[in-house]
Image (spheres, helix red, strand yellow):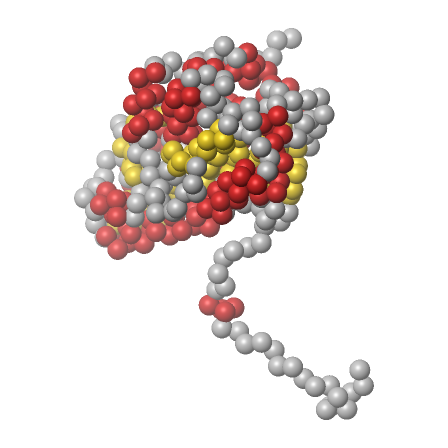
Amino acid sequence: MVAETPHVRRNQMTRGELADGAASGQVSAGLHRQSGGDHTVSVPAGVELRVAAPQPMALLLDQFDRTLLVPTLDRLGCTHFDRPEAELLGEAQPLNNFELIFIGAARVSDDEGIHTLREVLALNPSATIILLCRKELMTPPLLVAAMQAGVSDVADCRDAIALSTSIERVLRKADTRAERVLAIGAHPDDVEIGCGGTLLDHRRRGDLVSVLTLSRGAVGGDQSERILESTATAVSMGAQLFLADLPDTCVDPGVETIRTIEEIVRMVDPTVIYVHSKNDNHQDHRAVHIAAMSATRGVPQVFAFQSPSATNDFAPTRFVAIDEVIVRKVEVLGIFESQRHRSYLEPEMVIASARYWARNLAPRARYAEPFEILRSMTRTPTQPPTSSTSSLKPAPVVNIHRLGVEA
């Protein structure tokens, strides 16, 4: 019996497109969009912030008054994506960082409109749907239909304060619930091969993803070309990319590598880290693993991914389903055009590997990525205390001896 595989295609981006996209920080699987982040953070010496963290994004699905909405989104640092519905699903597929979906009143009363809305929401289940309409149209039947369609909030498109409040609430909530993920690899394409599907799934769920690549892959091909490919890949995945310049094939697990990783960990403050396994034939991969284990002592969750050079001692006990993003992973790996001769980058090999590891999740998943658990602890809540608890006074201490009670 032949296992069914999804239809995939190799990304056919030209070298010129890669260069243009990497330079502008916009090209992403054929889709142009902005990428932004906090450029005030000091990047450690020897490391380049190649791609900044993308700004949150809003999808505008329907025709409604945008006079106040667009300036409000701009002021809050939120980009927007506005396309006719006929083009929306195809072009929204690579947009893995949208937090908001704005719709008009007509959509919630139309079965076909609700179906399209659910298809869009499936691309990013953590996104929040906001219904925009005039206040006088907010009738009980409309609000009930909106709730049934999955709408989380309703705002008057002519009320700047209401719009700003709704958007700020969603962005704060997204920041609070999001994991901060850091994937560490020795060379360009290491992270994408080992845990690319998992990173795409993190982005799909609204998590913040950063990638640290410690060398520029000079031994494995043209260095400038590999840098451009890594840059375009990070933009495509919606990830922040840090690029160091340690010597390829000679990465040392000592102080320099440890300090480089420590500085990035301090900047990103990750809650989850993915790194090479120690069970690997490549000396750079083993060195990065050793250095990372020293540099990430305070991170609660650390997992090791499988590389093509992993040994038979690689023993995963955690498996992440990537059914929703397997096609995207193959497309992302296709951006590494200079490495297309590598058999492990062939779409059939990528899919076969994911099918093999998914046997550990059957029948719940058909495609999966494997990980060794290096550390897994419950994260300490970081939310500030609420007013109801912060105002509480400590209980008085009673001297039981003064009460005549024996201890």
* Residue plotted at (78% across, 87% down): 405
* Residue plotted at (53% across, 43% down): 259
Q: Quadrant of residue 315?
A: top right
**Residue 222 visible to the viewer:** yes
Picture layout, residue 12 above or below residue 77: above
Between 161 and 252, the one nearer to me in the picture: 252
Q: Position of residue 181 (x, y in %)?
A: 51, 40
* Residue plotted at (29% across, 23% down): 20
Quadrant in the picture for the C terminus: bottom right
Between 191 and 201, the one nearer to me in the picture: 191
Q: Quadrant of residue 291?
A: top right
Q: Position of residue 86 (x, y in %)?
A: 30, 23
Picture layout, residue 383 above or below residue 25: below
Residue at the extreme top:
1
Between 360 and 112, the one nearer to me in the picture: 360
Q: Is residue 392 left or right of residue 335?
A: right
Q: Position of residue 48 (x, y in %)?
A: 40, 36
Q: Is residue 349 left or right of residue 75?
A: right
Q: How many marks?
A: 0
Q: Quadrant of residue 302?
A: top right
Q: Is residue 356 left or right of residue 11?
A: right
Q: Position of residue 179 (x, y in %)?
A: 50, 43
Quadrant in the picture for the N terminus: top right
**Residue 144 visible to the viewer:** no
* Residue plotted at (46% across, 26% down): 216
